[in-house]
Image: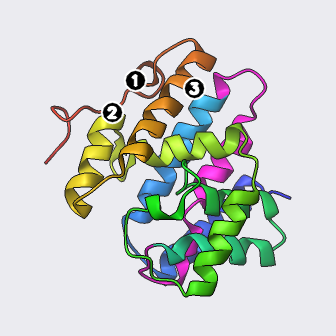
Amino acid sequence: MIPDRTTSMQLLNEAYELNPGPWKAHSLVTAECAEKIAACCPGMDSEKAFIFGLLHDIGRRFGVTQLAHVINGYDYLMKLGFDEPARISLTHSFAVKDIHTYIGIPDVSEEDCQRISDLIASFDYDDYDRLIQLCDSIAMAEGPADIVTRMSDVKNRYGFYPQKKWDKHLELQKYFEDKMGKSLNEVLSCQTSNQQTQ
């Protein structure tokens, strides 16, 4: 089950009131990118893609967390009966199905760490999982960025970026460019490092 756009925006706004931060703008950019890409891909629903992008970081409503936001978002949306975006809230951080590729602090219990590992292993990723993984990797609060620029920004902030995750995100870019028959930059007008405000 998936909430409509109005309900999704209400959930995002409520979450932002509980935990203000640039993550809301990032979520909006992720949603807009997902909508535009899905609209160019035969068989994909752009409205569904937008909602998934909007809610992928909803776990941040519970405070300033890192890995915990994926399981918090999953549990929260499952309780609301929104199983499809719940799944996306978990899978968006794991283009590679390996919890050790998470970039940030593993601020969860051993039990939740195992739950996350078991859940991502159980999911057969579809194009919506892949799409939000891609859009999350290019969405900056001020707009979409060239994927290498965005990943480099994350690497600079955290001090590392697992090579297999980096490679997987580039693979996702090619996958969707092949589906669209055009480049991401063409569809999204992505910023490059020279265009971004430092």
Q: Which residue is mark 1?
A: 185
In this rendering, the answer to whether 83 lies above or below 175 is: below
Q: Position of residue 2 (x, y in %)?
A: 80, 57
CA neighbours of label 3 inside 10 A, class few (<14), some (14 to 19), many (20+): many
SS at circle 3: helix
Q: Quadrant of residue 163?
A: top left
Q: Quadrant of residue 87?
A: bottom right
Q: Position of residue 176 (x, y in %)?
A: 57, 26
Q: Which residue is mark 2?
A: 146
Q: Is residue 50 magenta?
A: yes
> What label does residue 176 carry, if any?
3
SS at circle 2: loop
Position of the N terminus by quadrant: bottom right
Residue 73 visible, this orientation: no
Q: Total marks drawn?
A: 3
Earlier along the polypeptide chain: callout 3 or callout 2?
2
User: How far is mark 3 from mark 1, CA to CA?
Assistant: 12 Å
Q: Quadrant of residue 49?
A: top right
Amino acid at circle 2: Asp
In this rendering, the answer to whether 191 lies above or below 125 is: above
Earlier along the polypeptide chain: callout 1 or callout 2?
2
In this rendering, the answer to whether 115 lies above or below 123 is: below
User: How far is mark 1 from mark 2, CA to CA?
Assistant: 7 Å
Taking the spot 15% from the left edge, 32% from the top edge, the residue there is 194
Q: Position of residue 88 (x, y in %)?
A: 66, 56
Amino acid at circle 3: Phe
Amino acid at circle 1: Asn
- Which is in the foreground here, disc 3 or disc 1? 3
CA neighbours of label 1 inside 10 A, class few (<14), some (14 to 19), many (20+): some
Residue extent of the magenta highlight: 39-66
Are the two marked residues, 1 and 2, in contact with CB atoms closer than 8 angstroms? yes
